[in-house]
Structures are given as structure tokens and as C-alpha cells.
């Protein structure tokens, strides 16, 4: 069994990576404290290669259709294989990886690995955009978007872009969506779903309920109208 976790940075994906590692799934080597497979540079460059084929339609709209039919450049495939070398060469029965930037190349990762298991990790965007993440400025990964000096808006645009990219991609054969809030507040129930999906027993790791709803204590801007539709979809009122 091979698995990857996708979801924007600060979505709580480290919780899933740590859970998988604690459950005997080899998540690559070396890992940082967030459970990300390192070094990340090949993955970052792969993001820039794919972004060249995203069509920006202006404002907050992108056309991802070509990503599903265009030939995948050899350069991209080589970069992904280089990034995943420790996972690909591992003899472990159960293995996978996690790094938030996988979300930025999800359509092509799916085409390269159509049969692995994908966990899409969701968190209230108001909590996601409070803290800094390397994907805050999509321009760093060659993704076109309406530039802004408003840091929170920039983060929110990054959240929406990654949400739109995932939703525009046909779902793979093995797919599950998990809200971070459910993992924290209903861990046993959520892990039961994941165990059925992965086909292996999962360890229980410590969780912190205070990680939920941090936006309520935040004094900055943490909501933007263009996030309303996905927030309704995932019951973030």
C-alpha cells in the first residue's frame, strides 16, 4: 500500500503524517518535525514546471483542463522520482509521503501514480491563513494570480487556488477527504474511516482541541468572501 497526504500548508497534515509513521508506514527519509519528506527542492521545482501549463483567466480563476491531457514533461517526472527516491526504493510493505507542495502538482502526481491512496486534508481556511507557510505567495511556484500586498489575502488566494486545483482534478480510484477538525474532535470515528480506507490499523496520537477555531481569537483579517463556497461545502459556518 502506498499513500500520500495532500492539503495546503497549515491544514494539519502533519497529524496524518505522524499517525502514519506511528502506524508503521514508511514516510520517507529524512523527515522534518512536520512529517515532511526532505529535501524539498526537487518537489518545489516540479511545482514550477507544472505551473507553466496552468492558464490564468484573470482575477481568481484558472483553467486546469490542459493538465489532464498534455504530455507530462520528462523533467517533471525526473524531479518527482528524485524527490521520492527514498520512498520508491524502500522495501516497506506500506509506504508513502507528505509535503504540502504535493497539492500544487496533484494532477500530474495522480497521473504518475493513479493507483495509490490519496488523503485530502481540509482545515477551516480562517485557521489556515493565520500563520506563515512557504506556499503563501504562489508566485514563488510560478503560479499566476492577482498580486496583492495584503499578506492575509495572499494566503487566502493560495488556499483557494489549491482547493480549485484539487476539485478540478478527476478523483482517483482511492480517495478520501478528512477535515482536521474531525480528526481532533472525533479522532476514533475519523481513524475508523481511515483504517477502512487504508486497510491497516492506525495508531492514536495526542491531539490538541485548542488548535480548532484559532481564528476566533485572531485580531487580523481571516475571512474573504471568495472562500464562502468551499467553507459551505465543508460546513465551516
Image (cartoon, rainbow, N blue to C red):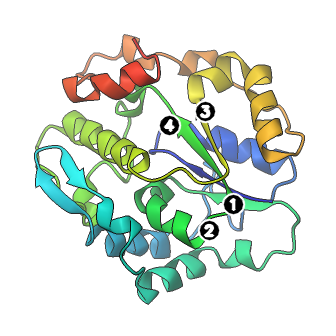
Q: Nearer the viewer, residue 13 or 112?
A: 112
Q: Which residue is mark 3?
A: 178
Residue 126 visible here:
no
Residue 47 visible here:
yes
x, y percent for residue 95: 78, 62
Mark 2–mark 4 distance (CA, rounded to whole Å): 23 Å
x, y percent for residue 15: 66, 38
N-terminal label among 3 and 4 = 4
**Residue for point 16% across, 52% down:** 145
Residue 142, above or below 218: below
Looking at the rendered structure, the secondary structure element under dot 3 is strand
Residue 43, above or below 99: below
3 vs 4, front mark: 3
Looking at the rendered structure, the secondary structure element under dot 1 is loop
N-terminal label among 1 and 4 = 4
Marks 2 and 4: CB-CB under 8 Å? no
Looking at the rendered structure, the secondary structure element under dot 2 is loop
N-terminal label among 3 and 2 = 2
**Residue for point 22% across, 53% down:** 62
Amino acid at each position: 500500500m502506498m499513500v500520500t497526504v495532500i492539503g495546503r500548508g497549515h491544514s494539519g497534515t502533519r497529524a496524518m503524517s505522524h499517525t502514519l509513521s506511528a502506524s508503521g508506514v514508511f514516510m520517507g527519509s529524512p523527515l522534518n518535525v512536520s512529517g515532511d519528506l526532505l529535501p524539498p527542492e526537487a518537489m518545489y521545482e516540479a511545482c514550477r514546471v507544472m505551473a507553466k501549463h496552468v492558464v490564468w483567466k484573470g482575477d481568481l480563476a484558472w483553467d486546469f483542463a490542459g493538465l489532464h491531457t498534455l504530455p507530462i514533461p520528462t523533467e517533471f517526472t525526473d524531479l518527482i522520482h528524485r524527490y521520492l527516491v527514498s520512498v520508491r526504493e524502500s522495501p516497506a510493505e506500506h509506504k508513502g509521503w507528505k509535503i504540502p507542495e504535493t497539492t500544487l502538482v496533484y494532477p500530474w502526481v495522480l497521473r504518475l501514480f493513479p493507483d495509490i491512496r490519496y488523503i485530502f486534508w481540509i482545515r477551516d481556511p480562517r485557521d489556515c491563513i493565520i500563520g506563515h507557510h512557504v506556499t503563501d505567495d504562489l508566485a514563488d511556484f510560478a503560479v499566476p494570480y492577482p498580486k496583492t500586498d495584503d499578506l492575509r489575502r495572499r494566503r487566502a488566494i493560495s488556499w483557494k487556488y489549491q482547493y480549485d486545483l484539487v476539485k478540478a482534478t478527476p478523483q482517483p480510484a482511492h480517495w478520501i477527504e478528512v477535515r482536521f477538525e474531525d480528526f481532533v474532535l472525533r479522532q476514533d470515528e475519523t481513524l475508523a474511516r481511515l483504517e477502512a480506507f487504508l486497510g491497516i490499523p492506525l495508531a492514536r496520537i495526542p491531539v490538541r482541541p485548542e488548535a480548532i477555531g484559532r481564528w476566533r481569537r485572531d485580531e487580523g483579517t481571516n475571512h474573504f468572501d471568495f472562500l464562502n463556497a468551499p467553507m459551505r461545502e465543508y460546513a465551516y459556518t
